[in-house]
């Protein structure tokens, strides 16, 4: 009663005050945390875990804080051996995002101390140091185990045995190791690819209240455990309008086939028969700053892997779309997903694994939003929007034999 206007797609609805990520969509600016570290500086000088610490705790860590954070995350990277049976229970061709989404929820079943439903109270409150320590532990676990779960989804699809997370490597180094290790004792991932993946992870670490972060918060607002909230975020990310777009870009490029087919494809987009994946953004209306850094990273990767055969088609599509009035007038520019898929493909990942490579680094962003909401002044308020009912008025029940 009293509600007259709805906001389809939340174009003009703010649901929280946040200090985590600042975006200026008109100027193409992305900065992390309230003091506003520009994404370009972080990509150049920071690491994914350092940036994760910044996003979650609000300040860049001291040397000692970073060392402790990294060692806690790595310490928690091992998952219970029973998880092997869980992964083996999927069909041989299960989509890795279906596995990862389920795996986060599955993981929560191990940690009753993180589950308010089992403990009968909100476990994560600002005033209690034990509660904050409990929260930190779940954060370490979720970040640490994200790469291991993702690597398990990768290996089970290839029919390979699982690899215990190694010690002494960086976050992306141990992730690549877990995926690629084939038993060679001295195996080490390529340092160039390890660094490139770290930059890609950092660029994907957070992006304000996108669909998946919103889903994590809405789910978390019922005070469910953080594993279930992260699983919900992962499910939201899976869709082709969000984190599934990097996979959709490669499928689109394969279907286009070669540069001479680009004009016909763009005509089909204009007739709304196709979508130009990797273009457009709810907030960025001029450019996505991440896409420039990604293009530079792509060049570094291609030096090691060789150029991807789809690159020519991608360039032709990009160059034609940015000049085409249809896209210019709608302010549609390439987003982070347009180029990232080409890098992942060059690195040898199958394209249904690309959304996983978006989800794993986004765990730090989801956790930053979840922690901020749980600790906000006045506590959590359940996210329960309203609707405007436009269905039928009261009707009387008609028995089946009398229905038309
Ligand atoms: N191809 C063709 N037309 C498009 C596209 C596109 N990629 N994106 C938007 N449009 C059209 C849209 O149909 C609308 O046209 P009209 O005004 O004639 O009805 C107009 O452009 C304005 O759309 P919008 O309001 O800017 O779009 P939105 O904010 O509702 O949706 C989006 C944003 C990202 C879902 C959309 O641009 C899209 O579907 N892009 C393709 C999928 C994609 O690349 N997603 C990744 C986003 S970035 C990373 C992430 O967040 O996961």
Image (cartoon, grey):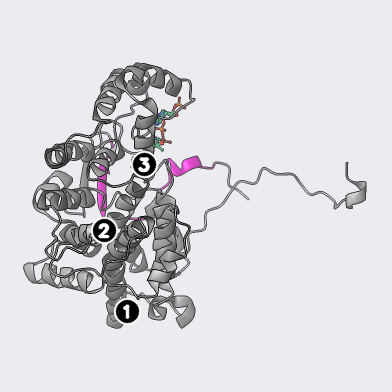
Mark closer to the chain start, 3 or 1: 1
**What is the distance, in whole Å, between disc 2 and disc 1 at their CAs?**
35 Å
**What is the distance, in whole Å, between disc 3 and disc 1 at their CAs?**
39 Å
Residue 271 visible from this viewpoint: yes
Question: Residue under circle 2?
Answer: 179
User: As displayed, is residue 282 above or below residue 159?
Assistant: above
Point 33% across, 39% down: residue: 283
Point 28% across, 47% down: residue: 349
- Queried whether the magenta region covers residue 295, the answer comes back as no
**What is the crowding at mark 3: few (fewer than 14 residues within 10 Å), some, or many (at least 20)?**
many
Q: Quadrant of ligand 1?
A: top left
Question: Residue under circle 1?
Answer: 131
Question: Circle 2 — which element?
Answer: helix
- Queried whether the magenta region covers residue 12, the answer comes back as yes
Q: Is mark 2 within 8 Å of ligand 1?
A: no
**What is the distance, in whole Å, between disc 2 and disc 3 at their CAs?**
19 Å
**Viewer-nearest residue: 378 or 150:** 150
Q: Which mark is residue 247?
A: 3
Residues shaded magenta? 6-25
In the picture, measured across the screen, residue 158 lies left or right of residue 24, that is: right
Residue 33 at what x, y percent from top left?
A: 21, 55
User: As displayed, is residue 192 above or below residue 80?
Assistant: above
Closer to the eye: label 2 or 1: 2
């Amino acid at each position: 009663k009293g509600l007259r206007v709805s906001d389809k797609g939340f174009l003009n609805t703010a649901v929280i005050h946040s200090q985590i990520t600042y975006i200026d969509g008109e100027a193409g600016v992305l900065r992390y945390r309230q003091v506003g570290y520009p994404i370009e500086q972080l990509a150049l000088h920071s690491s994914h875990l350092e940036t994760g610490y910044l996003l979650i705790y609000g300040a860049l860590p001291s040397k000692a804080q970073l060392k402790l954070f990294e060692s806690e995350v790595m310490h928690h990277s091992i998952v219970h051996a029973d998880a092997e049976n869980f992964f083996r229970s999927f069909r041989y061709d299960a989509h890795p995002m279906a596995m990862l989404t389920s795996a986060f929820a599955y993981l929560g079943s191990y940690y009753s101390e993180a589950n308010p439903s089992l403990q009968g109270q909100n476990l994560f409150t600002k005033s209690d140091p034990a509660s904050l320590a409990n929260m930190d532990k779940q954060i370490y676990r979720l970040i640490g185990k994200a790469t291991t779960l993702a690597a398990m989804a990768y290996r089970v699809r290839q029919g390979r045995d699982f690899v215990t997370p190694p010690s002494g490597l960086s976050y992306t180094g141990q992730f690549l190791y877990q995926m690629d290790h084939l038993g060679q004792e001295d195996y080490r991932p390529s340092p160039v690819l390890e660094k490139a993946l770290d930059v890609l992870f950092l660029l994907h670490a957070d992006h304000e209240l996108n669909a998946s972060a919103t889903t994590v918060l809405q789910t978390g607002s019922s005070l469910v455990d953080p594993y279930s909230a992260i699983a919900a975020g992962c499910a939201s990310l899976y869709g082709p309008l969000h984190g599934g777009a990097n996979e959709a870009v490669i499928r689109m490029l394969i279907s286009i086939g070669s540069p001479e087919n680009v004009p016909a494809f763009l005509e089909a987009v204009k007739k709304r028969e196709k979508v130009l994946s990797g273009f457009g953004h709810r907030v960025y209306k001029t450019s996505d700053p991440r896409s420039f850094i990604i293009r530079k990273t792509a060049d570094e990767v291609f030096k090691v892997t060789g150029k991807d055969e789809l690159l020519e088609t991608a360039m032709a599509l990009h160059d034609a779309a940015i000049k085409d009035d249809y896209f210019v007038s709608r302010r549609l520019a390439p987003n982070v997903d347009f180029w990232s898929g080409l890098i992942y493909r060059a690195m040898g990942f199958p394209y249904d694994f690309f959304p996983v490579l978006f989800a794993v680094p986004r765990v730090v962003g989801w956790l930053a939003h979840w922690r901020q909401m749980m600790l906000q002044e006045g506590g959590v308020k359940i996210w329960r929007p309203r609707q405007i009912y436009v269905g039928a008025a009261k009707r009387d029940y008609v028995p089946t034999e009398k229905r038309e």
